[in-house]
Amino acid sequence: MKLSFSAASPFARKVRIAAIELGLIDKIEFTPATVAPGQANEDYSRITPLKKLPVLITNDGDVILDSYVIVEYLNEMAGGSLIPDYGPRRWKAKTNHSLINGMLDSMLLCRYEKMVRPQGLQWQAWSDDHWNRAWTGMARFENIPDVLNGPFDISQIGLVCVLGYADFRFADCGWRKAYPKLDAFHQKMLERPSVKISVPPPA
């Protein structure tokens, strides 16, 4: 299998963590890809018109899009337990992950607004609104002990990637001081090899 990825992408990190946990990391060839707003990448657009990372190409040549769907595919392949099979836990996990993915999307948009949009055209109120979505999402998870203390699953993987991306791109945002339970959770998660070795490189 081949996975398009960037070491800076929290979405690709999510898949890397899952692949390590499921014992599939050695079955995946990681192919670096660069996607950025306003920059053409015709080769990658032929793989996915959305130009988003990551994308998994299976051994049969099928293209699987979206980090959650890729994790679900790998989880099924390995017979893993990263995504509950049925019942209330499954829907809670999927809902938590939808919130987490939205938080990551908002953080990425804040990054683009600050670093990519030309000076003089930046929209501060729009950026503040998106950052508030991520910030209040952290507040939500600060008070969900089932995620912070539960079994290692897609919700915990996604939350690790949110906090790691906050460190990577928004190092001065102060999330540790604001959310001590998230800080304790993150420190505990860093004891897992899959989480530790997938930490983004210095920004």
Image (spheres, helix red, strand yellow):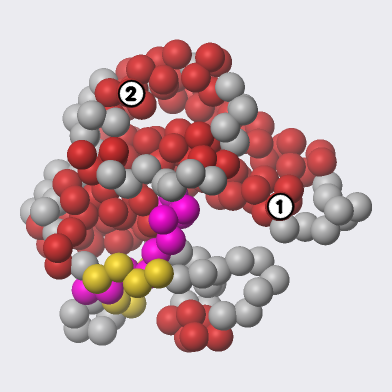
Q: Which residue is mark 1?
A: 115
**Label 1 sits on what residue type?**
Met
Residue visible at 58% across and 22% down?
Answer: 174
From this viewpoint, is residue 96 visible? no
From this viewpoint, is residue 140 visible? yes
Residue visible at 83% across and 47% down?
Answer: 123
Q: Position of residue 13 (x, y in %)?
A: 36, 51
**CA gap, disc 2 to disc 1?**
29 Å
Q: Which residue is mark 2?
A: 187
Q: Quadrant of the N terminus?
A: bottom left
Q: Residues within 10 Å of mark 1 (few under 14, many from 20)?
A: few
Residue visible at 55% across and 85% down?
Answer: 42
**Label 2 sits on what residue type?**
Gln
* Local secondary structure at mark 1: helix
Q: Position of residue 111 (x, y in %)?
A: 65, 48
Q: Position of residue 126 (x, y in %)?
A: 77, 43
Q: Residues within 10 Å of mark 2 (few under 14, many from 20)?
A: few
Identify the magenta region.
1-11
Indicate which disc residue 54 carries.
none
Please indicate whether residue 97 sits to the left or right of residue 197 in the image. Answer: right
Residue 141 occupies which quadrant of the picture?
A: top left
On screen, residue 182 above or below 30: above
Q: Is residue 10 magenta?
A: yes
Q: Between residues 5 and 106, which one lies in front from this camera angle?
A: 5
Q: Between residues 87 and 103, which one lies in front from this camera angle?
A: 103
On screen, residue 32 above or below 118: below
Please indicate whether residue 147 sits to the left or right of residue 163 in the image. Answer: left
